Amino acid sequence: MNTCLAPCPVVFDLDGTLIDSAPDIHASANAVLRMNSAGPLTLDQIRSFVGGGVDMLWRRIIAATGLPAESHRDLVASFMTRYHDATALTRLYPNAIEALGVLADRGYPLGICTNKPMGPTRAVLDHFGITGLFATVIGGDSLPQKKPDPAPLRTAFAALGADPARPRGIFVGDSEFDAETASNLGVPMLLYLQGYRRSPAEALAHRAAFDDFRQLPLLVEEAAAI
Ligand SMILES: O=C(O)COP(=O)(O)O
Ligand SMILES: [Mg+2]
């Protein structure tokens, strides 16, 4: 049961859901690889490494390049100096801003729950002028836990007025991490199909899937009513 008396909180993942940020992550990562005399990775490789946050991204890059595991901390630090305000190659997905506007106009409290660190999260939301749409933003370094632990999503829903003991709301995401987070919290997930998941959509638990943000307002209304 997810029935919400007031409009349900709707919380969004960020990378691969609202924004296509893989090109900036790719460019920043390859710059660091070059400085460390490692060859570049492809955009497809980097895209498949996104979802678990920056530490996991660099564990996956280290595994793919053979760089020494002990260099993880320095590589992450070097990456963050580029990534913290990298927006030049990032795009909002088509019709995402319009769908957010429709939901905001209908009174849905909106939030973000991302594994992206808060620095680049704030930078990209400001870059696109959409910070004000979200009453709460939880980043990958906001809490000790990251998705798929349910704590960040529970915190986002609570900040939007949901009872933390019995969270009600809808999570919109693109990846295995998001599907698992929603399952762990017991809330419905709407799966955006144009993002960065590694497995077929059928392998991810979700209430409904969509490939165009014009479909989202209706899916939110349906998920809120069940
Ligand atoms: O930065 C990541 O690895 C993932 O970010 P996301 O949670 O917004 O998909
Ligand atoms: Mg994502």
Image: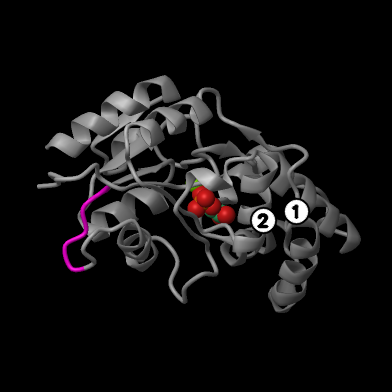
**Image-quadrant location for residue 45:** top right
79 over 106 or under it: above or below: below
State the residue at coordinates (32%, 40%).
108
User: With respect to residue 207, does 50 lie above or below?
Assistant: below
Residue 167: say if magenta: yes
The secondary structure type at the circle numbered 2 is helix
Q: How is the image coloured?
A: one colour
| CA separation in Å, label 1 and label 2 | 5 Å
Residue 74 sits in quarter: bottom right
Above or below: residue 156 compared with residue 47:
below
Residues tagged 1 and 2 counted as in contact (Cβ below 8 A): yes
Task: Specify start and end residues of the magenta stretch as a single range.
Answer: 165-169
| Residue 199, percent from left and from top | 41, 40
Left or right position of 154 against 41:
left
Q: Position of residue 117 (x, y in %)?
A: 60, 62
Which amino acid type is marked by label 1? Answer: Asp
Numbered tag placed on residue 144 in the rendering? none
The local secondary structure at tag 1 comes to: loop
Residue 196 on the magenta span: no
In this view, the residue in front, 87 or 127, is 127
Q: Residue at image x 36%, y 36%?
A: 191
Q: Residues within 10 Å of mark 2 (few under 14, many from 20)?
A: some
Which quarter of the rendered picture does the C terminus lie within? top left
- Residue that carries the numbered disc 1 in the rendered image: 85
Comes first in the chain, label 1 or label 2: 1
Q: Would you identify the image quadrant in which residue 76 lies?
A: bottom right
Residue 102 location, x and y as percent?
Answer: 40, 27
Q: To which residue does mark 2 refer?
A: 120
Say which amino acid is labelled 2. Pro
Q: Residue at x 66, y 61 (%)?
A: 119
Task: Report whether the residue tagged 2 is closer than 8 Å to ligand 1.
Answer: no
Q: Residue at x 49, y 55 (%)?
A: 114
